[in-house]
Amino acid sequence: MAQPSSILSSRSQIMHKSLPRLCALFVLLAGWTLASQLAGELLVPGPLTVFQHLTALSVLPDFWETLLITAWRLALGLGLATGAALLLGLAAGASPHILRFSSPFISTIQSCPPVVWLTLLMVWAGTGTIIPVGVLFAALFPPLFITVTQGRLSLDRRLLAMAKVYAIPKHRQLVQLIIPGTFPHLVSGLSHALTAGWKAVAVAEFLGAGTGIGAKMFWAYRMLDMEELFAWTLVLIFLGACVELGPVSQLRSWAQKYTSRTRDQHND
């Protein structure tokens, strides 16, 4: 049975962690309310008005379908970018020739702003899912490729040389040495990709898709429906916060634990 002192200690720790967030939320709501009073409800709907509109939206099937569409595009674009980064990044990290050959292409893709890919894809493919998925792939693939390549290059070459001496099969080296060794780098890249992914998908949907959260924001802007625009903005912010506090936080925790465990094994 838990001691009262331990229960009180855990509660105080929770309050200590939650207090800054609650204060920040209070300041945000107070600033939002003040801006609404100064600019007027037509330009800046108040928090209560927006929350009421959002509640009305949430009971509609179209609301949840819109969320699923955007989430599916994020998952598809992130999955394609991660798969390509793993395949090419591991190869580039293992071969200096492949690294030198691929570097100019990666630099070119990374230097192009998303609006370039957005414009080209709209010309080539019209509008639809291809636009946000393509823009997301172009935005996430270069940094994921770089992190995977750096992870492959940072592997202990003595372990790889020992594996070659003992004629360990390539697939076992990949599963037992290479992938675990690049895992912290990949997790770091994925945490950044998840954080930035919602923004990239929403921007691409705003300009190049007829469905999704970004498209809803576009039509709210066109119709000057500020309550709708603020409601979908809140949804986007909430989803981004959930991703940051959920999967991203978990990925960073895994990376830290893996790095600490690996460091302890090397010290032993």
Image: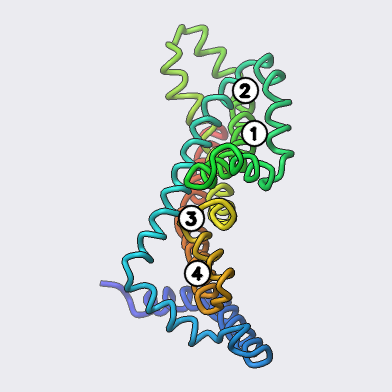
Q: Going from the N terminus, do you reach mark 4 or mark 1 first?
A: 1
Distance from Cα at disc 3 to Cα at disc 4 = 15 Å
Q: Residues within 10 Å of mark 4 (few under 14, many from 20)?
A: many
Pick the front one: 220 or 15: 220
Camera-nearest label, 4 or 1: 4
As drawn, which residue projects farthest toward the left?
1
Quadrant of the rendered image containing residue 37: bottom right
Pick the front one: 113 or 263: 113
The label shown at residue 210 is: 3
In this orientation, does residue 264 appear?
no
The residue under label 4 is 232
Amino acid at circle 3: Gly
Distance from Cα at disc 2 to Cα at disc 3 = 40 Å
Q: Going from the N terminus, do you reach mark 2 or mark 3 first?
A: 2
Q: Going from the N terminus, do you reach mark 3 or mark 1 first?
A: 1
The residue under label 2 is 93
Quadrant of the rendered image containing residue 70: bottom left
Q: Going from the N terminus, do you reach mark 4 or mark 2 first?
A: 2
Q: Position of residue 174 (x, y in %)?
A: 46, 21
Q: Are marks 3 and 4 in contact (CB under 8 Å)?
A: no
As drawn, 81 above or below 118: above
Camera-nearest label, 3 or 4: 3
Amino acid at circle 4: Trp
Distance from Cα at disc 4 to Cα at disc 1 = 34 Å
Camera-nearest label, 2 or 3: 3
SS assignment at label 4? helix
As drawn, 35 above or below 180: below
The residue under label 1 is 146
